[in-house]
Image (spheres, rainbow, N blue to C red):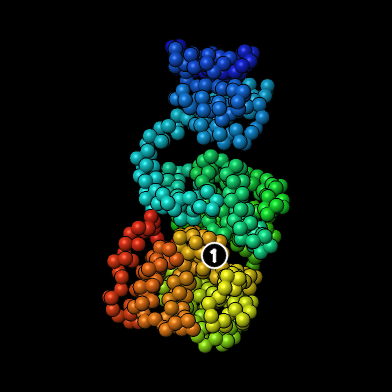
Amino acid sequence: MAQDGMFSVLVVDSHPEAAVLFKKGLHARSSFPAEVDSACTLDEAFEKMRRRLFDLLLIDAQMHQDGADKFFEILGAHKITVPFVLMTPVKDDKLLRAAKRAGVAGCIVMNESHYEELAGQLKEFYSGYKRSSQKDADAAKEMDALAADADAAAGMQTKVDELTGIYTHSYFQVRVVEEFSRASRYKYDVSCLFLDIDHFKVVNEEKGYHAGDLLLRDCANFLFENCRVSDLMARYGGAEFAILMPMTGYEEALELAKRIRLRFASYDFHVAGQVLNLSVSIGLTSYPEDRMDRRGDLIAFARQALLRSKATGRNRVTQFRQMENVMGVNTPVPKMEEGRVLDFQRRLSEVTELARRGSLEASRAMIQALEAKDRHTAGHAATCAKYARFVAETLGMSVEDAEAVELGALLHDIGKICISDEILLKPAKLNFEEYEKIKEHSYLGYKILRPIRFLREEAVSVLHHHEWFNGEGYPSRLKGNAIPLGSRIIAVVDSYDTIRAAGARYKKTDPVEDAVNELIRYAGTQFDPRVVKVFIEVLKNRREFTTDKYDKAQLEQKLFELPDRDAPLYLSSDLS
């Protein structure tokens, strides 16, 4: 503060008349009296700051001819500790993001009418800066501990998605837990967006998976350019992205979601030499306005809203609070006999269950017909389904999630009905072209199952059951926890049964011990070591594997090397 107790402000603007207008605007507010000094160049401003201490700086964003980045670089080099407010003639989102990154206390879009409101804005910025500084001091130890926990749990190697360069599914989950805990304690808002590229599978189908990968990378760059510096972005899986927004309520998050949707629709994506215009579906939730009982609800609610956006026509934003109204919250209840309601619900449930059973029976019939062609694969799907269910139950999955994993395992090879018998039944080793054809079966299976509404989770598990834990699998080259858990389970039980029985076409059937050691050998590269460990427990509990003569030490070493070895393997409602 100045010696007379007045608030001291340094205005840095190349136009001297700006300081006069600022003085007029500030003196108009006696509740916030200020002493205003001015500088026409950055050098002059730094010299004045060396001679005296100011409470706040007002800086014209156009002070440096080389642009904002160079301007912020200069400010950073001088290690300014005084809060500063940026003045800009027009709203520029890119400039505002750069300003936030540089530590700006606030931004003002200036015109003549704003001078009279200036005092109130500066008081608000300054007060907010002081509150934030005090709050950061009070919470610093806890925040550092939470950040350290997040780094340890997610691991440096699993933070960034190799394809897109933004954060991974697993690291995002850890940060959600961290931010939700912090928001609950310090009573501030936190919001979450989930986005999915509409009709992305058409790009993969028509342009190829390499083109799809390039598109995902461009989409990640688009999101990075259109989100705020404080937002945390991750690729959640497939063509699905997530954005975590600390200290952001519903209205601000909704504004961002709408802006992303509109800009995405008008953006030119360059894929395989062509320009594509795509759309995106978005789901949004915000705590505490949406009541949440568990930390995972922030993800679960946003994904439910995303599914509603896709189910109601795509290319739209759905707020979870809107869904609550649809589902009956705060909705007037009409008078109706309870018995009639229950009877209708029962009949509707019976019809739905009949349709479900009909589809499953048809799918089982197709699997049986496929396996009947080759005696070496007879019963393979049923065996995989049985083992997958045991693994799911051992992990403590809910009944619904365990059933989804079981069905996914039962149907994992259904896409092979689209592959010619010449290739499927070939007794010799497949050539390159034939192997590439075989590799298409996971996507073909997904394509068959995806239109069936109650098999959507199973469809995703089928699509990715040949992904490798090290990212070298197919079709999407997902890595680690970015691979859906159902797919990781199917990969283990499928390979085990293939080694034990279905592989007899090429070699003698291996004993259980050799099959277990083969799983351990490829744990960490092809398989999730944690799933391998649980599967071995299943075999022991069922007394199908009664010896300790397997490479237990190697498995424990691979488990120890996992960066996120202490993170939970299963999170409720998070199979895909």
- Of residue 511 and residue 161, the one placed in the foreground of this image is 511
Within the image, what quadrant is residue 60 found in? top right
Q: Which residue occupies 42% across, 32% down? A: 133
Q: In this view, does 25 lie above or below 217?
A: above
* Whether residue 332 is visible: no
* Whether residue 275 is visible: yes
Q: In this view, does 314 lie above or below 107?
A: below
Q: Position of residue 252 (x, y in %)?
A: 59, 42
Q: Which quarter of the figure is the N terminus placed in?
A: top left
- Of residue 167 and residue 48, the one placed in the foreground of this image is 167
Q: Which residue occupies 51% across, 46% down? A: 232
Q: Where is residue 61 in the image (x, y as percent from the top left)?
A: 60, 25
Image label count: 1
Q: How crowded is mark 1: few (under 14 residues within 10 Å), some or many (20 or more)?
A: some
Q: Which residue occupies 63% across, 44% down? A: 255
Q: Position of residue 340 (x, y in %)?
A: 63, 76
Circle 1 — which element?
loop
Q: Is residue 448 above or below residue 318?
A: below
Query: Label 1 amino acid?
Result: Tyr
Q: Which residue occupies 41% across, 73% down? A: 391
- Of residue 241 and residue 190, the one placed in the foreground of this image is 241
Per the image, the residue denoted by label 1 is 474
In this rendering, would 552 be left or right of 471?
left
Q: Is residue 297 above or below residue 122?
A: below
